[in-house]
């Protein structure tokens, strides 16, 4: 079968079987083209909760599918590729966090959404990369323990200097590959280009960016901006997505190594098997995890 034939079969089967397909923006365009919704992980879960379909396929990584299940407890949630994990989410488990919390008594524990459902059970408030600054400002406590991404945490510290923020030394190995040296070299090659960067990149690289934001915020900034060239410092698939969306502009990856192998684990054939009911992995969470992990997400929503 050709790519187009595979896509047509997926579109037919998802309609026939009542399946909602979610695709993170880091997925290949061949996959995003057959998705019902494309975007950041938490936004996709919110879309799934409102979708009429009772079966949801998450084309992303495991923590995203778990978050989707937390927001859609009554629905069948399928992870497109069972091997697609997240190294950052796996850097810390619930026991690790409980031990760390004892070191910081009186601190409100804030976790990046890029964490497992089990770890979220020990968290006070959850945040996304786009909401972290806003929500931490609203927390009624000046002492914050932020986990696991130290780079995003450092960015938040700069934006919210009035609070005492303790960090864990975790982070995204994909975004960590973007170095300040590479950013400087890319700017030298494209002197008129604006640098759009994810705050999961390290602080030295962030200092050279023209704009810092989540994946969706980066894409929105590139689409509405008046520059003709952009240097993209996040997962490299975004360069291709933006070039397709904005053919009148030019986009370049800051680092050729900024690629998430876990995101690339899902293939178009995987999606086909998910919608025909023969592939993927159903996400099953016990009642205790569902209740306890949901609390930090509800608190995030309450704070805005």
Image (cartoon, rainbow, N blue to C red):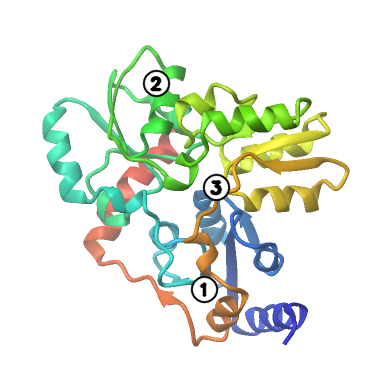
Q: Give whichever of discs 2 and 3 has the lower sequence position.
A: 2
Q: Which residue is mark 1?
A: 54
Q: Pinpoint residue 199: horizontal percent, then vertical percent.
A: 50, 33
Q: Which residue is mark 2?
A: 157
Q: Name which residue lies at 39% across and 57% down.
A: 63
Q: How many marks?
A: 3
Question: Is mark 3 in CB contact (under 8 Å) with mark 1?
Answer: no
> Is the residue marked by circle 3 packed among few (<14), some (14-19), or many (20+) residues within 10 Å?
some
Q: Secondary structure at mark 1?
A: loop
Residue 52 visible, this angle = no
Q: Pinpoint residue 100: horizontal percent, then vertical percent.
A: 16, 37
Q: Pinpoint residue 137: horizontal percent, then vertical percent.
A: 41, 22
The answer to whether 202 appears left or right of 231 in the picture is left
Q: Secondary structure at mark 3?
A: loop
Residue 7 visible, this angle = yes
Question: Is mark 2 in CB contact (under 8 Å) with mark 3?
Answer: no
For the residues carrying marks 3 and 1, which lies nearer the camera in this image? 3
Q: Which residue is mark 3?
A: 258
Q: How many angstroms separate mark 2 from mark 1 (CA)?
A: 40 Å
> Is the residue marked by circle 1 packed among few (<14), some (14-19), or many (20+) residues within 10 Å?
some
Quarter of the image with the N terminus in it = bottom right
For the residues carrying marks 2 and 1, which lies nearer the camera in this image? 2
Q: Where 239 falls versus 156 (above or below)?
A: below
For the residues carrying marks 2 and 3, which lies nearer the camera in this image? 3
């Amino acid at each position: 079968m050709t790519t187009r034939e595979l896509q047509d079969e997926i579109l037919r089967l998802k309609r026939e079987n009542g399946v909602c397909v979610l695709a993170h923006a880091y997925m290949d365009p061949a996959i995003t083209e057959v998705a019902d919704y494309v975007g950041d992980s938490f936004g996709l879960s919110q879309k799934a909760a409102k979708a009429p379909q009772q079966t949801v396929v998450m084309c992303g990584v495991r923590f995203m599918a778990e978050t989707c299940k937390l927001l859609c407890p009554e629905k069948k949630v399928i992870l497109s590729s069972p091997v697609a994990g997240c190294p950052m989410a796996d850097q810390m488990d619930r026991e690790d966090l409980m031990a760390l919390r004892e070191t910081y008594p009186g601190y409100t524990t804030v976790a990046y959404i890029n964490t497992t459902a089990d770890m979220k059970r020990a968290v006070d408030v959850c945040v996304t990369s786009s909401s972290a600054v806003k929500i931490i400002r609203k927390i009624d406590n000046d002492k914050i323990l932020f986990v696991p991404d130290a780079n995003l945490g450092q960015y938040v510290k700069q934006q919210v200097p009035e609070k005492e923020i303790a960090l864990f030394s975790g982070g995204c190995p994909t975004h960590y590959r973007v170095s300040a040296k590479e950013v400087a070299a890319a700017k030298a090659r494209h002197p008129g280009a604006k640098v759009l960067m994810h705050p999961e990149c390290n602080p030295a690289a962030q200092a050279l960016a023209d704009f810092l934001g989540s994946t969706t915020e980066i894409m929105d900034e590139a689409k509405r901006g008046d520059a003709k060239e952009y240097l993209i410092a996040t997962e490299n698939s975004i360069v291709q997505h933006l070039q397709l969306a904005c053919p009148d502009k030019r986009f370049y990856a800051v680092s050729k190594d900024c690629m998430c192998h876990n995101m690339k684990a899902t293939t178009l054939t995987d999606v086909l098997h998910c919608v025909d009911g023969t592939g993927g992995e159903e996400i099953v969470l016990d009642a205790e995890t569902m209740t306890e992990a949901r609390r930090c997400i509800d608190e995030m929503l309450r704070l805005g």
